[in-house]
């Protein structure tokens, strides 16, 4: 294994390592995925990239403090080197180094039969430069592009400035002739266009407290990068590594860029505040006010909306964790796995699954059949208003290109449909309740289901659905699920008895619900096949 010279450039000098191994050098490069600005940040981020191939702590690496000239002179004597410039945000590698790339995933070890373990990902922030297989003079050069790091003023975006701005815009509209003439005070649906106006104007108006920037500009520029950083942490977790949150002590944490879920939660929060503002005004019966009355109303609305925001942030979101937790996970760059402990955080994602639906597949999910369930919010609803202001696209050019693509797809669909109609062709209405028994059912196991339990569960779920539609007693459904659960979790020696019990339970069901006879007969046959198959050995380690 060749050694690598590593230089880390800081404001007050350099750290030089002349005998680091390739794994240590690559891990340091991977840590730059978090946008560190000093050695203390590297140390803090290191656990999120640590694998058994490198020391547990970054401070254990063989690095010494030297001045810039000494570090630069060392590069002239070697071909295998890496320079990580934390000041100018760039990486350079020597001519003998293998290419790393801005967005790559590596396996730090490949086990027997080619199984890859210990994933390590490199996902450089958009503003980092990278020069690979270059000469040492790269350490001397200035950046090729201006250094523009995304910074977010959350005090303005989430604080009093937001509430006061929305309250003022809401009252301006409610006190207008347009509001009264449209009947928006009594008709909730009429308010939607006003909601879009208030939300758009907040996002797209430059502000002095944001140094002339629009609030929207602070939401974008890092979403795709942070998506990849979070995905890398999920890969580590699935390789049995600990889920570790970004420490809040790292430089610039308060102003760090927004990830996807924070942007989406911000959108939803603004809509919640605006909608609540309309409701408050309607309840108050607000009409045109004099200046003194307007100031009082504005103060009251600000107080009300502040309470709405606090309650919304801490209340369950769509039956899951509260927005406050979702935002924190996004800021600390960890995916949300149900029930997964996160090092550095006390809370964990709520388990949304309620075991009361009598669904065999849901019961298998609750038993951990499918591993950890990760949840996420993609933000597709931000595109539904056909407004650039709300879109997840950073630039108007990208958004307009997407709009053209959508328009072309719609036109192509309409053209093909018109051509079919001209030929007299008709399309059958899709059946939303297609049977699991329709078509050919392969005898091959499903991926990740060598024992065939999942295939049986799909078929059994249809039986349960028919029973529910027929008004079957809940006790019948529970007994069927209990028999199936015993069958899929028993030892090999107990399999025949558990299979017999499950078949008898199905036989009893079929005797009372004749429409299920054919399905039950097929299920019983498949149960017999599993009992005879050696693949049903539950003692296998996979």
Image (cartoon, rainbow, N blue to C red):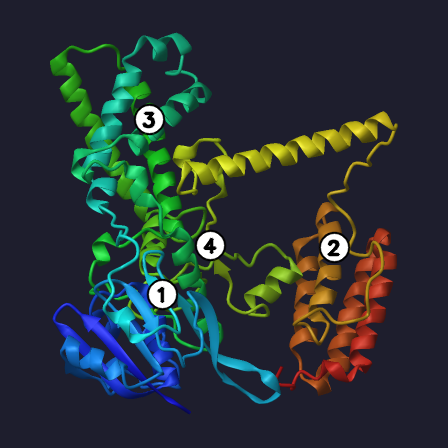
Q: How much space separates mark 3 and mark 4, taking CA atoms? A: 28 Å
- Please state if 265 lies on the left or on the right of 368 as rendered: left
N-terminal of the two: label 4 or label 2?
4
Q: Residue at x 74, y 82 (%)?
A: 535
Question: Seen in the image, is 19 located left or right of residue 107?
Answer: left
| Quadrant holding the N terminus | bottom left
Dot 2 or dot 1, earlier in sequence = 1
Count neighbours of disc 4 (C-alpha within 10 A) and say few if under 14, some if 14 to 19, many if 20 or more.
few
Secondary structure of residue under mark 1? strand
Can residue 46 be seen here? The reply is yes
* Residue at mark 1 to residue at mark 4: CA–CA distance: 31 Å
> What's the mark number on residue 462?
2
* Pointer 3 or 2: first along the chain: 3
Residue identified by numbered label 4? 376
Vertical placement of residue 283 versus 446, above or below: above
Compute the Cα span from label 4 to label 2: 28 Å
Residue 335 visible in the current orientation: no
Q: Tell me the crowding category of disc 2: few under 14, some 14 to 19, or many 20 or more residues within 10 angstroms, Cα based.
A: many
Would you call the spot at circle 1 few (<14 residues within 10 Å), some (14-19), or many (20 or more)?
Answer: some
- Foreground: disc 4 or disc 2: 4
The percent position of residue 36, horizontal first and vertical second, equals: 26, 66
Q: Identify the mark nearer the N-term, 3 or 4.
A: 3
- Residue at disc 4, secondary structure: loop
In the image, residue 67 lies at what x, y percent?
Answer: 13, 78
Whole-number angstrom distance, CA of label 2 to CA of label 1: 55 Å
Does 5 sit above or below residue 346? below
Could you tell me which secondary element the residue under label 3 belongs to? helix
Residue at numbered disc 3: 198
401 on left or right of 252: right
Q: Find disc 1 in the rendering and name its residue.
A: 130
Query: For the C terminus, which image quadrant?
Result: bottom right
Towards the viewer: 103 or 298: 103
């Amino acid at each position: 294994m060749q050694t690598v010279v590593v230089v880390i450039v800081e404001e007050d000098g350099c750290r030089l390592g002349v005998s680091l191994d390739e794994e240590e050098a690559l891990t340091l490069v991977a840590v730059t995925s978090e946008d560190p600005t000093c050695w203390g940040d590297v140390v803090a981020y290191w656990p999120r990239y640590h694998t058994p191939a490198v020391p547990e702590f970054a401070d254990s690496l063989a690095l010494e403090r030297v001045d810039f000239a000494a570090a630069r002179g060392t590069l002239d004597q070697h071909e295998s080197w890496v320079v990580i410039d934390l000041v100018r945000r760039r990486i350079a590698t020597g001519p003998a180094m293998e290419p790393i790339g801005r967005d790559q995933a590596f396996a730090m070890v490949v086990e027997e039969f080619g199984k890859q373990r210990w994933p390590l990902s490199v996902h450089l922030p958009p503003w980092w430069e990278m020069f690979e297989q270059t000469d040492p003079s790269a350490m001397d050069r200035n950046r090729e592009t201006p250094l523009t790091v995304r910074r977010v003023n959350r005090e303005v975006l989430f604080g009093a400035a937001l509430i006061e701005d929305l309250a003022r815009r809401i009252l301006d509209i409610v006190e207008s002739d347009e509001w009264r003439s449209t009947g928006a005070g009594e008709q909730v649906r009429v308010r939607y266009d006003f909601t879009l106006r208030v939300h758009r104007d907040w996002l797209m108006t430059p502000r002095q407290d944001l140094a002339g920037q629009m609030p929207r500009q602070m939401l974008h520029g890092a979403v795709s990068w942070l998506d990849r950083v979070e995905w890398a942490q999920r890969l580590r977790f699935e390789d049995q590594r600990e889920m570790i949150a970004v420490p809040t002590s790292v430089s610039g944490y308060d102003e760090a860029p927004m990830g996807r879920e924070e942007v989406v939660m911000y959108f939803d929060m603004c809509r919640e505040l605006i909608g609540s503002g309309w409701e408050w005004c309607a309840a108050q019966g607000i009409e045109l006010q004099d200046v003194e009355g307007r100031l009082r109303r504005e103060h009251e609305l600000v107080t009300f909306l502040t309470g709405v925001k606090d309650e919304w942030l801490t209340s369950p979101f769509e039956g899951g964790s509260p927005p406050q937790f979702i935002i924190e996970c996004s800021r600390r760059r960890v995916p949300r796995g149900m029930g997964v402990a996160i090092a550095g955080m006390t809370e964990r994602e709520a388990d949304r699954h309620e075991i009361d639906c009598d669904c065999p597949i849901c019961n298998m999910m609750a038993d951990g059949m499918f591993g950890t369930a990760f949840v996420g919010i993609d933000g597709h609803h931000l595109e539904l208003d056909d407004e650039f202001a709300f879109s997840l696209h950073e630039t108007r050019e990208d958004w307009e290109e997407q709009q053209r693509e959508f328009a072309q797809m719609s036109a192509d669909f309409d053209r093909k449909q018109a051509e079919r109609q001209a030929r007299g062709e008709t399309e059958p209405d899709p059946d939303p309740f297609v049977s699991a028994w329709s078509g050919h059912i392969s005898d091959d196991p499903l991926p990740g289901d060598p024992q065939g339990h999942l295939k049986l569960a799909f078929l059994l779920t249809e039986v349960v659905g028919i029973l529910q539609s027929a008004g079957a007693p809940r006790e019948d459904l529970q007994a069927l699920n209990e028999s199936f659960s015993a069958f899929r979790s028993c030892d090999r020696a107990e399999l025949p008895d558990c299979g017999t019990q499950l078949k008898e339970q199905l036989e009893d069901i079929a005797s009372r619900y004749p429409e299920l006879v054919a399905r039950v007969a097929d299920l019983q046959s498949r149960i017999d096949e599993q009992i005879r198959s050696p693949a049903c050995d539950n003692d296998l380690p996979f």
